[in-house]
Image (cartoon, grey):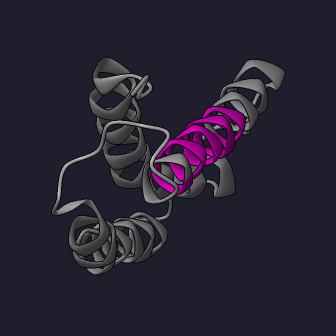
């Protein structure tokens, strides 16, 4: 049986969820600005944003099921399910931020 979650464990989970929300918002903003011609995005960005979601969500779900079947605490299950989603939002946010706004 796992040890009970501490306040630090719960804080870490809340932080990961918050970072996921912030990164998601940043990526959506840059992509929408790209569609409006205000941000430099690649020609394949629209296709990319559709094709990247199913594998990330599947990995997230598999992580959650695996953790829960192994007797993990709820915060551990949440953290393991957030990990692949954060990896994708973090990489997208960094990639799009480097491209920057369009000034023409």
Which residue ends up furthest to the right in the rendered image? 7
Instruction: Examine the image and state in which quarter residue 49 appears.
Output: bottom left
On screen, residue 59 above or below 23: below
Displayed quadrant of residue 77: bottom right
In the displayed structure, does residue 23 sit left or right of residue 89? Answer: right
Query: Is 51 placed above or below 70 here?
Result: below
- Image: 98 above or below 15: above
Residue 2 pos. (x, y %): 57, 46
Indicate whether residue 19 is drawn in magenta: yes
- Residue 39 in the figure: left or right of residue 7: left
Question: Which of the 4 image quadrants contains residue 59?
Answer: bottom left
Q: Position of residue 40 (x, y in %)?
A: 32, 36
Overall secondary structure of the magenta stretch?
Answer: helix
Which region shows up in magenta?
A: 17-32
Q: Which residue appears at 29% of the width and 35% of the height? A: 91
Decide if residue 1 is in sight here: no
* Rendered location of residue 42, percent (x, y): 19, 49
Q: Which residue is drawn at 56% across and 37% down?
A: 23
Q: Camera-side residue: 83 or 2?
A: 83
Question: Does the rendering let one see residue 12?
Answer: yes
Pick whichever, 88 or 66, lies toward us: 88
- The image quadrant where one finds the C terminus is top left
């Amino acid at each position: 049986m796992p040890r009970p979650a501490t306040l630090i464990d719960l804080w870490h989970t809340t932080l990961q969820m918050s970072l996921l929300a912030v990164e998601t918002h940043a990526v959506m903003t840059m992509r929408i600005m790209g569609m409006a011609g205000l941000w430099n995005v690649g020609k394949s960005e629209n296709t990319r944003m559709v094709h990247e979601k199913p594998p990330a969500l599947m990995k997230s779900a598999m992580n959650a099921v695996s953790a829960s079947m192994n007797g993990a605490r709820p915060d551990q299950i949440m953290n393991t399910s957030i990990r692949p989603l954060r990896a994708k939002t973090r990489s997208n946010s960094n990639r799009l931020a480097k491209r920057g706004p369009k000034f023409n």
